[in-house]
Amino acid sequence: MNGIRILDILVVLAYFAAIVYIGRRAKAASSKGEESYFLAGRKLGKLYQAFLNFGNATEPQGAVSNASFVYRSGASNAWYSFQTVFINPYYWFMNVWFRRVRLLTMADLFVDRFNSKGMGVFYSLFQICVAVLLIGFGSFTAYTITASLVNKAEDSWTVEERAAVESFRELRALETQQRVSIIAAELAGLNAIVPDALTGAQRARIAEITHDMAADTKSFENITPLTPAQQQRLADLRDAKARGDIYSNVSVLRPPVYKWGFYIMFIAVVGAYMVLGGMQAAAVAEALQGTLIIIFSILLIPTGLYAIGGWGQLAERVPAKMFDLFGGSLTGWSIFAITLVSLIQMNALSPNMNIMGSAKNETAARMGVTGLYGKRLMIILWTFAGLIAAALFVGPDALADSDTAWGMLSERLLGPIPGFIGLMLAGVIAGVMSNLAAKSIAVSALFTRNIYRVFNPAASETKSVFVARCTICVVLVVGLFAATFMKDMMAVVKLVITVNVPFGVLIMVMFFWRRVTLPAAWTAIIVAIALNVAFPIVAPWIPAMTNNQSLAISSIEKDGKPAPVYWEVVTRVDKDDPNSPLKGSGRFDMENFMATKLGIVDSATMSARNRENLRYYVDAALPFIVLILMSLLTRNRNPGQVDFFYGKMKTPVGDTPELEAQAIEETRRNPRRFDHTKLFGKNSSWEFGKWDRQDAVGFVACCAASGAIIALFWGLLKLASGG
């Protein structure tokens, strides 16, 4: 077994033991009642809020996906995660809103605003399904990272494993030949133009291609176009890869018995400390896990720079275009599209109430934004890890699969040092666990408060906490089974980005506009979920859809690779027949299908990137349009309840329980006592408030911090490129 020693295993086991111990220590405090278990008694200060926000923002695929995307296409692909730096100033206000509503769960919002337990139940069921997806994804990510660090020695491969790996390498070689032949043809065409007639963009492209050819001479040794036989072989291998029949490496954990063993152990540890300690355990564990995340994010940078010969070697070994933060495959429209859906969907995340609501006061809730900035700095480190991988694994040493960049880099740089691979594993697993912890507590609160208590209102708080603990166990186990069906990390990432957009639109508009009505909310939610979630997931189970040849089409990208138009994956029905009919699988792109059928665009003629952008814009716009139009056509039935909801949203949280109770009672008697603070006048239906000094200073400081981090990122990349 490569890359891991007994000491590494002991480091990971020590981490697991520490996490379970934290859960046991927090058990007594969390058993006092629902508020103690779900919200840590609303006593968490600034530091714990920072770590909770840091852990919740650190998505499971963060380090691995960033390194993979950057290794494949350059620093601009870091925007898949880094775009949230634009959203950080919004958190300065959002964190306070979720503290001021003074509720236990996100589903309580719909009871508090619309007096609708039915919508609370529906939100809870939906979020439990989302949590199963995310817990499965987190477990799958932890397994993928661990598996990439424990590879079988090549001399112990079976015949089938060797054939699969060699076929994968052949696929990459043919794709490289196809790519470089296309680039060479482009360069020949540009060189045929009279020099004086070249535009500035054409001159820059010639310089870029020339630099790339000099930096990667091995790939450009063979620039001949593929023969018909090679083209057919390439098509066969791409079909095999889409089926999962070929792969880039052979992990010790690949056999099902080891895979299941890993999942069971991982879920058991997460469940142990969450079941025992609740949000109190999550908060303390976040401090430990946040520290580990920072350590493992830093580890690869100095060791990687030393391995390639120093900072200056980045510019020598890596193509210049890979340092371009604002260029590459992600255009400004792409960044805006991803930022838009991220801004919307984060309003509906199930852990929001548990994290922001657990703050002891508004200042503590607001200071949670510092944890979010910590995450943005981690992205910079992960990006440079990807660039170091691009410098280290080049030419004959190039990786067959970019998704293994993080694991292979860790094995190459840290493997020789006993215990460091274990520390890396503990840090990566900590990142996944910290993300799953808040989700587990959130869904247990949703089930207990908004489903179990609806049908059993007489249940005691002790009984409710017991049910919550059982819920965590059930959801984690179901998430474990979901993980075993996941094969493509990127496919799940794209689903996760938009799955909460329907409820995100509702909650965002609900905070700002008192005209939102319950019928409008139901209509917008049902339409958006049907388009964005339900039908795209159900479609692969409908043979009339998957076998429809007009839907199983692909466009050809600039690098010569086919990209399915409506499906995630298109394969042959008969893998051995090159002329076999095709079938689609994975998520169905209902957004592009609908836009094409309505004559708005022709998705088949668009690039894969533009189809993805269109999908995000449709997902964001449709629920807004439906919600606003339906609200204008219907009326609120409980104006008194609406008044109290917005009055409470404007009532500052008291520093002591006595002051808090006094302030809420005064708002209950006069719910419109803060209407004079409305930005558009006291009679306006828009609830935007006038900023006070803390609002303005905090927002400006957040914008300055975001700008400074972007400038730091750009400056470091510029410095690394030698520019």
Image: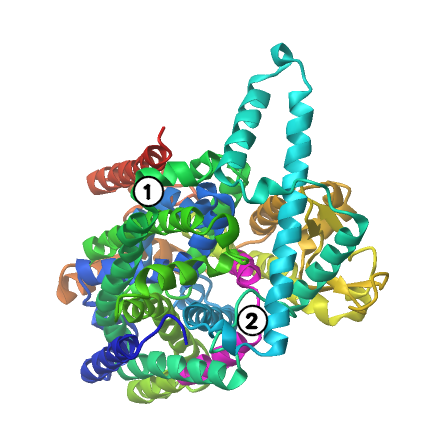
The spot of residue 131 in percent (x, y) is: 47, 71
Instruction: Read off the residue under disc 1.
Output: 689
Question: Can residue 311 be seen at all in this image of the molecule?
Answer: yes
Q: Position of residue 532 (x, y in %)?
A: 61, 58
Q: Residues within 10 Å of mark 2 (few under 14, many from 20)?
A: some
Residue pushed farthest right? Answer: 579
Part of the protein shown in magenta: 471-497
Is there any visible trace of residue 680 in the rendered image? no
Question: Residue 282's quadrant in the figure?
Answer: bottom left
Q: Earlier in the sequence, mark 2 or mark 1?
A: 2
* Residue type, numbered disc 1: Gly
Magenta region includes residue 476: yes
Q: Quadrant of residue 519?
A: bottom right
Vertical comparison of 634 with 540: above or below: above
Q: Main secondary structure of the magenta part?
A: helix
- Judging depth in this view, the residue of 314 and 163 nearest the camera is 163
Q: Residue furthest top?
A: 196
Q: Nearer the viewer, residue 373 or 483?
A: 483
Residue 670 found in image quarter: bottom left
The C terminus appears in which quarter of the rendering?
top left
Q: Closer to the camera, 577 or 514?
A: 577
Q: Which residue is mark 2?
A: 486
**In the foreground, 35 or 634:** 35
